[in-house]
Amino acid sequence: GENVEQHPSTLSVQEGDSAVIKCTYSDSASNYFPWYKQELGKRPQLIIDIRSNVGEKKDQRIAVTLNKTAKHFSLHITETQPEDSAVYFCAASGTSYGKLTFGQGTILTVHP
Amino acid sequence: DAGVIQSPRHEVTEMGQEVTLRCKPISGHNSLFWYRQTMMRGLELLIYFNNNVPIDDSGMPEDRFSAKMPNASFSTLKIQPSEPRDSAVYFCASRRQGAGEKLFFGSGTQLSVL
């Protein structure tokens, strides 16, 4: 089955800096890669996703890049703000049923 | 739409007791997923259904766990008997197959087994 590795496990940045989280996946058939943000005590919420026919996608301060050859994808957050502090999960899916395999998560802390 | 609805939000029980978690997916969604979240193991997929039929239950830890989806608007996850190591947050999530693959999570059930 699919295996998703996520790094780093923790990331600390100063407000205004950029943050980058990286994930690798094992199943070359995977074609959908979402990113979820989970605040303390809350549910995971989708913040951005990308499909395998696209190399990059941007939404305001967040962007995701995908390298299918290398089987890795990354989340980029620019101009970080304290409210960006949360746990971020990457995931990969290759089946029509949408079964998502999640990475282990990255705890992002943005210091004011 | 109210989103994915789970109940209860919190459950505290004693070892050996039966626990039933409930989920109502978003109306029109035909795929439903049960996840378990712990610090050690992250988000683990336990089981998922498509059109009320269980597709893959390979993530269910052992026979003490069972899940049902009697109709398109209701699913249950049952643990019998419960053990302290079952303590975790259990999330239900749903999506509509074929209309994009965006998965929406419920608020979760925080389970504590004493």
Image: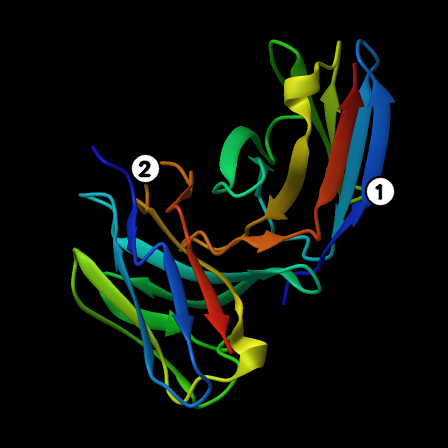
Residue nearer the viewer, B91 or A2:
B91
The chain that hosts pointer 1 is A
- Give the x, y percent position of residue B73: 16, 55
Could you classify mark 2 by the number of other residues whose Cα lies within 10 Å: few (under 14), some (14-19), or many (20 or more)?
few
Q: Quadrant of residue A53?
A: top right
B21 to the left or right of A15: left
A57 to the left or right of A66: left
B9 to the left or right of B1: right
Q: Amino acid at mark 2?
A: Ala
Q: Is residue A77 above or below residue B57?
A: above
Q: Amino acid at mark 1?
A: Pro
Q: What residue did someone put label 1 on?
A: A8
Q: Callout 2: helix, strand or loop?
A: loop
Judge depth for marks 1 and 2 and give the one in front: 1
B90 to the left or right of A86: left
Q: Which mark is residue B53?
A: none
Residue, x 37% and y 87% (percent of image)? B80
- What whole-number distance in Å separates the C-alpha atoms at marks 1 and 2? 32 Å
Residue, x 44% and y 76% (percent of image)? B57
Is residue A56 visible to the viewer in this orientation of the structure?
Answer: no
Q: Callout 1: helix, strand or loop?
A: loop
- Give the x, y percent position of residue A108: 75, 33
The chain that hosts pointer 2 is B
Residue, x 81% and y 27% (percent of image)? A20
Q: Quadrant of the C terminus of chain A?
A: top right
Q: What residue did someone put label 2 on?
A: B99
